Amino acid sequence: MKIFPKSDYTFKIIGEETETLERLKRRTEASESLTSKITDKSFLGIIKENTFRIISSEIGKGAFCVLTGKIVNKDGQVEVEINKAFRILLSVFLCFPFVGLIAQFFSNTEEFSLIFILVAILQLLIIRYVFIEFAFRRFSKSSLSKLSDVLDIDHLKKR
């Protein structure tokens, strides 16, 4: 079971590689730290030669997904994953059901039931497969559509 979702995509660009990368550089504010800040550019991140590691510049939700990609000739690939800061925060949320289970065990040992273990497991699964998955799909779709617009992507296909 993967704790955090990740998606890989391949794409083809319409124009030339150099002009596409220049357009991406113009629309990206250089930033090593991949954290949200107010800017008039579409993305924040690093672009080196034909590779990039960027986040959307939308305040609040843009930094959730990191887009790491490479363009070679007219073909490209991009990997979408959850930003490291959000993975740490979500890991804390994933620990809450176990903390509650342990607290329940030590507070009322005579009233402790095995149903609490089932509830903790269900809470863990709901956090992972409902909340985290929903947020990842929503924010990655938004970031990918913005990237498609900037790069003039002909078609985007999931690997």
Image (spheres, rainbow, N blue to C red):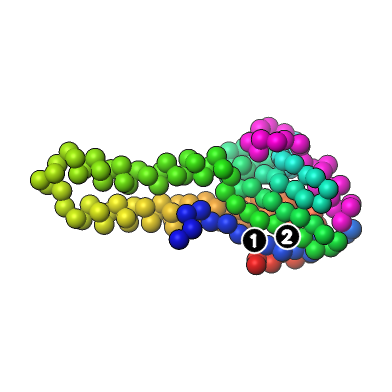
Residue 84: x percent and y percent? 56, 43
**Residue hosting label 1:** 8
Q: Which of 130 and 47 is in front in this view?
A: 47
**Residue hosting label 2:** 77
Contact between marks 1 and 2 (CB within 8 A): the answer is yes
Residue drawn at x 15%, y 48% is: 112
Residue 73: within the magenta?
A: no
**114 horizontally vs 51: left or right:** left
The residue segment tinted magenta is 17-39
Residue 86: x percent and y percent? 53, 42
Q: Which of marks 2 and 1 precedes in the sequence?
A: 1
Establish if 100 lies above or below 156.
Answer: above
Establish if 68 lies above or below 104.
Answer: below
Label annotation for residue 101: none
Residue drawn at x 26%, y 57% is: 118
Q: Is residue 116 visible?
A: yes
Q: Can residue 145 be seen in this view?
A: no
Q: Name the residue type under label 2.
A: Gln
